Structures are given as C-alpha cells and as structure tokens.
Image: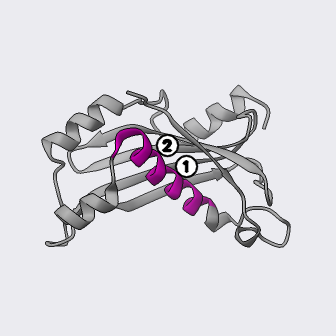
Amino acid sequence: MKKILTSTYKVRFQDCDPFNHLNNARYLEYFINAREDQLLENYQFDIFEIMRRQGLSWVVATNQISYFKPASTMETITIDSQLIAYTPKSVQVEMRMWDEKKSELKALLWSNFIHFDLKTQKTLVHSPEFARLFEDILLPVEETNFEDRRTSFFKQKPV
C-alpha cells in the first residue's frame, strides 16, 4: 500500500494575492483538498461518505505551516502527504507542496486531526478497522517536532 500520496494542481488566479503568489490562507485549502482527493483515490477512503453514513469525522485540532517559496498564479504544483503518527483518537499528517518537478519545496504542513462523533459532539476512539488502515499506511518521519522537521528541509536542498 502506498504510504506517500501525490497529486498535482494548478494555482488559480482567484487564490492569489496582488503579488501573484498563492494567498497564505489558501495553502491550507490546497493541502486539505489534496489529502481528501488522495485518500479517496488511493485507499477508497471517503471521509464524506463516512460522515454521512456513520456520523464520524476528523476535525482539525492544530496546523503548523512553514512557507519556503511562493507558489505563483497558473503554476503547476505537486502536493504529497503521508500519515506520520496516530493515537487512538487522532492522526497527524505531513503535507508538502513542491514545484511540478519536486525540486523546490514551497510549503510544509503538519496537521493534527481529532476523531469526532458528530452525533454526540465528542471525541471518539478509532475503530479497529480505522486503526488497521492507519497502521498499514503509517510512515513516521525522523524528526519529532515541527521546527526540527522544517530545519531538516533547509539542510537537504537549497530553498
């Protein structure tokens, strides 16, 4: 089973600031949309179907983002993502935005999602089925905190 999921997108004019750079807030939208698409395409994991049928979801608890280089209007970008950690009630995903050739890192994001029961409005322990999937796709990174991870990218390549 693939552990690093990848997709490409075009940066749209309406998502950019007056400098023709992707607006800072839009990075989160591009990342989340990419992860949703990747989960469905690669694992047939449809979070909206799960929400509709089971009343379960994952809500964002925290985001940590670092901007390396701007993504520009009409540029093709590559977004990859991976599950880097999980607990009985949460998942942590790393997402990276690159240029089309994956030679220049544009942004790095760590998102923590809490498993949530929409009916009771409370956090929830993952089912054994979800836990098995998470175990199969887990790909931890060496760094245990965001700043160390961010710094590791500075050391890998000139950005």
Looking at the picture, how far across and down is residue 73, in whole percent? 80, 60
Examine the rendering and report whether any part of residue 137 can be seen: yes
Could you tell me which residue is drawn at 70 percent across and 69 percent down?
15
Left or right for 83, reference 15: left
Looking at the picture, how far across and down is residue 44, in whole percent? 34, 44
Q: Which residues are the magenta region?
A: 27-44
Find out whether residue 35 is within the magenta segment. yes
Could you tell me which residue is drawn at 14 percent across and 72 percent down?
120
Whether 127 is drawn above or below 72: the answer is above
> Closer to the N terminus: mark 2 or mark 1?
2
Examine the rendering and report whether any part of residue 57 can be seen: no
Quadrant position of residue 148:
top right
Find out whether residue 32 is within the magenta segment. yes
Looking at the picture, how far across and down is residue 23, in whole percent? 71, 66
- Find numbered disc 1 in the image and state the secondary structure of the residue it sits on: strand
Prevalent SS, magenta region: helix
Colouring used for the render: one colour
Per the image, the residue denoted by label 1 is: 109
Quadrant position of residue 128:
top left
Looking at the picture, which amino acid does disc 2 mark?
Glu
Left or right for 56, reference 10: left
Rendered-image quadrant of the N terminus: top left
Looking at the picture, which amino acid does disc 1 mark?
Leu
Per the image, the residue denoted by label 2 is: 94
Looking at the picture, how far across and down is residue 74, in whole percent? 79, 57
The foreground one among 42 and 136 is 42
